[in-house]
Image (cartoon, grey):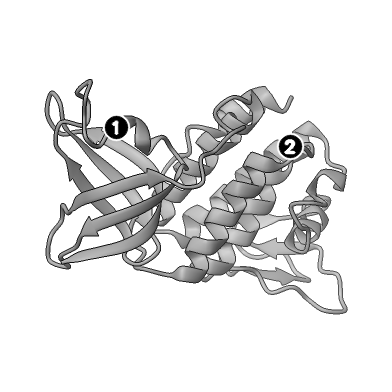
Amino acid sequence: MLHKTNGIALKTTNYSESSIVAHVYTESFGMQAYLINGAKKHKAKISSNLFQPLHPLDLVVYHKETSGLNRIKEVRQVPVLRDIPMNIQKSSVAIFINEILYKVLREQSGDPYLFHFVLQSILWLDESESPLANFHIVFLVKLSRFLGFLPLQPAHHHYPYFDLMGGVFSNSLPAHSYVLQEPHTSLFYTFLSTSYEKASAVRISKIDRKYLLEKILEFYKLHTENFGIVNSMYVLEEIFH
């Protein structure tokens, strides 16, 4: 049966000499794999170039719940990303976000709220003229809400520790090493309530940003099955030195 849905391209893998499998996070069905025959041919009806990472898509697809590989009837890039492909900082951030999304969305079913958050984050990144050194940290913090492990913010009391395993702020040091301590607890707390627009105003050194990012990825690893290593974080370190 044919369905219209919006999607976000995340990854392509080769299927044969001329065909690909496109991994697309869709609004209606969650993560889907689509077999596209002849996508690498010069005059392909559906070209592999349409599935550049993080590009928003307008799709008409064949969908069967029992099928591991579905097919696409029609696809357009809507809207077309203008600045991310041309801007080295934005494209580096996009590579990182793309890798994270592919890891955490693999088992996700359709969720319009999560889809809308991811899409609006991509469009903000594409259109923004603000400094971007803290954008990916705010993105990870906001994304954790939709994945079910956003930390609860203490309303009127400051706690010196954040237990990464329990996902809670604490007055006492936990009996394991998965923990944030000051000054990184305060920085993490600040990012919990920071918008993309205000992220660049958070003052943080390169060393502290690197450490906080490593700990947030550790937090994700503790709460996401088969999360693994994030290879693209080293690209961000080079870009935001």
The picture places residue 204, in percent across and down from the top left corner, at 83, 41
The picture places residue 27, in percent across and down from the top left corner, at 40, 63
Circle 1 SS class: helix
Residue 25 lies left or right of residue 235; in this view the side is: left
The residue at the point 77 percent across, 39 percent down is 208
Circle 2 SS class: loop
The vertical placement of 230 against 66, above or below, is above
Q: Mark 2 highlights which residue? A: 133
Viewer-closest of 7 and 239:
7
Q: Residue furthest bottom?
A: 156
Among the 4 quarters of the image, the one containing residue 46: top left
C-alpha span from label 1 to label 2: 31 Å
- Figure label count: 2
- Mark carried by residue 48: 1
Residue 169 lies left or right of residue 30; in this view the side is: right
**Amino acid type indicated by mark 2:** Ala
- Mark carried by residue 80: none
**Amino acid type indicated by mark 1:** Ser
